[in-house]
Each structure stands twice: as C-alpha cells, then as structure tokens.
Amino acid sequence: MPFNADLTGATWGPIRWEMTPRRALAYRAALAPQDAAGLDDAAADGLFALPMHVVTPEWVLVLMAREHPDQTLSLDEGRRAVHAGQDSRFHRPIRAGDDLALTATLLGARTSRAGVVTATRFDTRDARTGELMVETLSTTVYRDVALTGAETADLPSPTYEPPAA
C-alpha cells in the first residue's frame, strides 16, 4: 500500500511529556555513563536532560502518525522507514521537572529512487507557558514504498550550520 501524501499539513498531538528526574538520569546514564557532572541531580543549576533526549517523546508522535486512520501504509511498510536526517534547534535546555507539550506536522512527501521521502516538523513547548523550546525537522525515507496523493515539490531537508566563530 502507498504512503498517503494527502496527509501533508496534518498535525499530531499535542502530547504531554513530563521530564522527570528519573527519565533524565536514566537516559543520561545509558548514553553518557562517564559524564559524572551530568549525573549530579543536586547541581545548583538543576538537572538537564541530554539534548538528544527530545527524540523520545518525538517518537511517540511518529508512531501516532503511522497509525493515522487515513495513512495507508501497511505495518511492514512502516517498518521500512529509515531516519535520514534531523535538525533540532534548541531555544533553551530541557530540565528535569519540565512539563513538555509536543506536536508533529507532516510538511510533505515526495518520491525518490529509494521510495518515499517525508519531512516532519516537531515542536516542543513548555506546557505551562507555551514557550517554544525545541523545533526539529526530521526526514524519513520509506524504502520501496509507493506514494499516493499530491507530491511535495520543494521538500525541506535538515541543514547543518557550523557554529559562529
């Protein structure tokens, strides 16, 4: 079954995600076990989540999008998804105790030699204030999957901008 490009513009969420100290510490311990400073949950400036931790609640939205009633992907086709790129812009760190609200919007889909390429925007906000904390552009390739619906000609793609000198 094909990927339904007519879902372009659809938004999933918001979902709520509490960044508990336990979540922040467990993720950090798994990915940065030698980072003793990061494991200090009594630090004066608070316990910060690793920046890449934002993908954990984003993944919940990815699964919601695949299960949308108008999405025509089979389970097998959904499993053929390859994460091809990600550009996350952090406006402020995520701290233990933050209550997050996340949404995902399908920006478009197009065909490629490999199958279907999609672009999705994720917004992570402080659920209490509405402040934008992280915005992510994620690109996915669904290998050997066809496309149905309107193809997006100018699909945005993640870019790398080196830090200012």
Image (cartoon, rainbow, N blue to C red):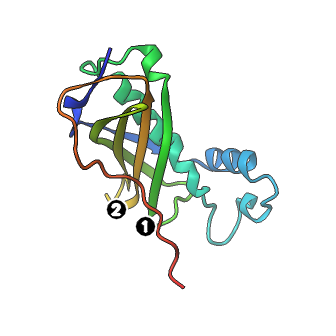
Q: Quadrant location of residue 158?
A: bottom left
- Name above or below for residue 7 compared with residue 23: above
Q: Earlier in the sequence, mark 1 or mark 2?
A: 1
Decide: few, some or many residues near mark 1? Use Cα within 10 Å; few <14, some 14-19, many ≥20.
Answer: few
Amino acid residing under circle 2: Glu
Q: Residue furthest bottom?
A: 165
Please report contact status of discs 1 and 2: CB closer than 8 Å, yes or no.
yes
Residue positioned 32% across, 14% down in the render: 1
Kindly identify which residue carries mark 2.
131
Q: Is residue 94 left or right of residue 73?
A: right
Q: Nearer the viewer, residue 2 or 39?
A: 2
Q: Secondary structure at mark 2?
A: loop
Kindly identify which residue carries mark 1.
91
Q: Secondary structure at mark 1?
A: loop
Q: Is residue 14 left or right of residue 17?
A: left
- Name above or below for residue 100 compared with residue 8: below
Q: Is residue 71 left or right of residue 85?
A: left
Residue positioned 50% across, 39% down in the render: 83
Q: Nearer the viewer, residue 110 or 59?
A: 110
Where residue 165 sits in the image (x, y, percent)? 54, 85
Q: CA distance from mark 1 to mark 2?
A: 9 Å
Q: Quadrant location of residue 78?
A: top left
Look at the image and tell me whether residue 120 can be seen: yes
Decide: few, some or many residues near mark 2? Use Cα within 10 Å; few <14, some 14-19, many ≥20.
Answer: some
Amino acid residing under circle 1: His
Residue positioned 74% across, 45% down in the render: 30
**Mark in front: 1 vs 2:** 1
Where residue 101 sits in the image (x, y, percent)? 38, 47
- Name above or below for residue 110 compared with residue 126: above
